[in-house]
Amino acid sequence: MPFAIAIDGPAAAGKGTIARAVAAHFQCPHLDTGLLYRAVGRKMMDGIDPIEAAVTLSEDDLARDDLRTADVAQAASKVAVIAEVRAALLDFQRAFAARTGGAVLDGRDIGTVICPDAPAKLFVTASAEARAKRRYDELIERGQDASLDQVLAEVKERDDRDMNRADAPLRPADDAIHLDTTELSIEEAVAKAIELIEAKRG
Ligand code: CDP
């Protein structure tokens, strides 16, 4: 049976970094599912209907280099509320998760909706302040304009929208292991995640 690893959590909790390192460790492919919603959000900003954008999403859309901005993150969480958008992205994510040899997926609903049978599920959290500071540093490093207060407000707004939507809201699966990274360095968080998954793998 392929070993799917589900990694969920709120905005900028370190899911992406952890998921990439976990995938490298277990030598399996990684899917950043947030990128799918970002690509749809970006197309909505370009004036395209989000459902149409989700149904026709292509590799080129995912390869755009303008998906990691604060505006696109907000647009992503707005299109992520639309049930038809989520439905259009479901099969691709499930097929990725079922790959022979396993896969790591990170997002908001991987453990609850996309891979409810995944044998290893992590729910990665950190304080809103720690998450905002990490995202702020990332944006500055990429040369984007940002203020820490605004990033914090946007992270909270997005979490609120993600947790309170009707379809596939952000919440830990009942069998998810919680990992709070507030006080952890990247290396410590990655090591802890691998240790927890190894223990689940048996
Ligand atoms: O990197 P960050 O945690 O800031 O966000 P992301 O993972 O790129 O996701 C962007 C937005 O896409 C989230 O705020 C969610 O609204 C949405 N999303 C979702 O609804 N379901 C997923 N599986 C992944 C992302």
Image (cartoon, rainbow, N blue to C red):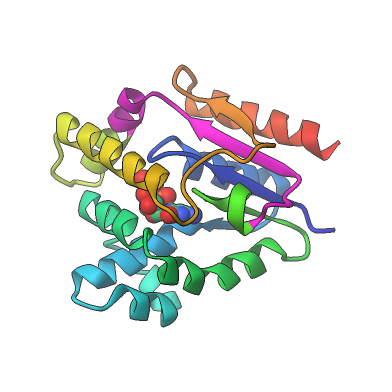
Say which residue appears at 55% left-offset and 68% top-offset. 90
Q: Position of residue 51 (x, y in %)?
A: 36, 76
Instruction: Tell me if residue 176 can be seen.
Output: yes
Along the line of sight, the residue nearer the viewer: 170 or 186: 170
* Quadrant of image for the C terminus: top right
Which residue range is magenta in the image? 115-134
Report the residue at 74% width, 57% height from top: 102
Position in image of residue 73 (x %, y %)? 29, 52
Please give left or right for residue 109 compared with residue 48 in the image: right
- Residue 79 lies left or right of residue 100; in this view the side is left
Q: Is residue 121 placed above or below 38 in the rendered structure?
A: above
Magenta segment: does it hold 118?
Answer: yes
Residue occupying the point 45% across, 76% down: 59
- In which quadrant of the rendered image does the N terminus lie? bottom right
Left/right placement of residue 24 relative to residue 182 reads right
Residue occupying the far top of the picture: 183
- Place residue 39 in its image quadrant: bottom left
**Magenta-span inclusion, residue 128:** yes
Q: Quadrant of residue 158?
A: top left
173 vs 19, nearest the viewer: 173
Residue 141 picture location, percent across and down:
25, 40
> Which of the 4 image quarters holds residue 65?
bottom left
At horizontal 44% and vertical 21% (from top left) the residue drawn is 182
**167 lies above or below 108:** below
One can see residue 68 in this view: no
Taking the view exactly as shown, the residue that stands out farthest to the front is 166
